[in-house]
Image: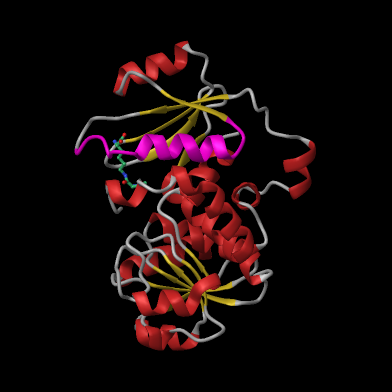
């Protein structure tokens, strides 16, 4: 899992309104609509049963391991607030922050150490992990951007937590899924897991040939300059949760409105709806 840097998150809070407008331009859906779709909410539920706005959401800085990432909790809190919920950052950190959150009546906690970034609903016990939420959140966005995924071939690059979650969400949207990972056993594990629940996933062992056969891509791996200009056609649609972005700079311009990529927004928004 890639550790974010200060520069990855520094611009998020101030640009959320523009980011959301861009998202609507690409997918026809807002960040909130994509997150709700990712967790199976009907659009109507989003508008007739507005999630209780009074719900307190505490975002807790964690100093363990490599410690605080400047701007991280602030970005998380702003994304949650942007969705219409009441988010606050605890004054205390670590265990003190958890205690402060519970004592102030927070129902939902967000916190991240070096290994896991989770949202926890103290009332229901529901937990949402950022990797899982990011995978299904990006697929929900891709489904909007493609106007549906039923029967469409989609290549998942990277069979880690995000890729696994994306592959499951894709087959649930009716897509024909192929997976490529540097590590063949990771692809085999993903394929076996989905086979157990009745879905067939093709394993690609050569990325070049896989990219020739697919124009709808989910880049869920932490490698940059993986997708080159020559891999991009006017039909290419890409959901790229992986950090850093796997598309080389020239390709980003070519893809323009057919590329979904952000460091935190879709994952955090999906975590929020995942624990409601
Ligand atoms: O500021 C803090 O509270 C830090 N403890 C946060 C550390 C986050 C580490 N994880 C990551 O940077 C990435 C994120 C994209 C989400 C999952 N891993």
User: Quick one: 209 or 187, which is closer to the camera?
Assistant: 209
Q: Residue at x 44, y 38 (%)?
A: 76
Is residue 68 a member of the stretch shown in magenta?
Answer: yes
Marker count (numbered): 0
Image x and y of residue 73, in percent: 38, 35
Q: Looking at the rendering, which quadrant does residue 115 occupy?
A: top left
Does the image show residue 176? yes
How far across and how far down the image is residue 189, in percent? 39, 63
For the point 57% across and 67% down, the residue is 199
- Left or right for 121, reference 94: right
Q: Quadrant of ligand 1?
A: top left
Q: Which region of the structure is painted magenta?
A: 66-85
- Above or below: residue 45 compared with residue 166: above
Give the colour scheme shown. secondary structure
Residue nearest the viewer, comparing 125 with 237: 237
Q: Does residue 110 sit above or below 79 in this rendering?
A: above
Q: Residue at x 58, y 65 (%)?
A: 142
Residue at the far left in the pictured view = 66
Q: From the viewer's perspective, is 92 left or right of 273?
A: left
Identified at 65% across, 68% down, the residue is 174
Viewport quadrant of the C terminus: top right
- Asked if one can make out residue 140 in the rendered structure from this viewpoint, the answer is no
Query: Where is 245 relative to 53, above or below?
Result: below
User: Which residue occupies the foreground of this view, 121 or 254?
Assistant: 254
Residue 42, percent across and down?
Answer: 74, 48
x and y percentages locating residue 29 in the rendered image = 66, 57
Does residue 222 show up magenta in the picture? no
């Amino acid at each position: 899992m890639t550790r974010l840097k200060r520069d990855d998150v520094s611009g998020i809070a101030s640009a959320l309104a523009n980011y959301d407008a861009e998202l609507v331009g690409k997918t026809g859906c807002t960040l909130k609509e994509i997150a709700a779709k990712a967790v199976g909410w009907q659009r109507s539920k989003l508008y007739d049963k507005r999630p209780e706005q009074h719900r307190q959401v505490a975002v807790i800085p964690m100093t363990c391991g490599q410690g605080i990432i400047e701007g991280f909790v602030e970005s998380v809190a702003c994304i949650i607030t942007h969705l219409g919920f009441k988010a606050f950052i605890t004054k205390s950190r670590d265990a003190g922050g958890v205690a402060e959150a519970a004592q102030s009546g927070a129902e939902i906690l967000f916190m991240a150490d070096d290994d896991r970034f989770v949202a926890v609903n103290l009332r229901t016990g529901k937990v949402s992990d950022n990797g899982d939420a990011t995978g299904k959140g990006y697929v929900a966005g891709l489904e909007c951007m493609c106007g549906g995924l039923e029967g469409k071939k989609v290549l998942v690059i990277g069979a880690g937590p995000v890729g696994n979650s994306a592959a499951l969400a894709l087959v649930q949207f009716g897509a024909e899924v192929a997976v490529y990972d540097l590590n063949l056993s990771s692809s085999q594990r993903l394929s076996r897991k989905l086979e157990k629940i009745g879905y067939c996933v093709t394993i690609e062992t050569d990325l070049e040939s896989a990219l020739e056969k697919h124009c709808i891509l989910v880049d869920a791996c932490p490698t940059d300059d993986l997708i080159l200009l020559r891999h991009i056609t006017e039909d290419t649609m890409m959901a790229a949760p992986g950090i850093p972005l796997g598309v080389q700079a020239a390709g980003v311009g070519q893809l323009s409105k057919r590329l979904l990529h952000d460091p935190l927004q879709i994952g955090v928004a999906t975590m929020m709806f995942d624990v409601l």
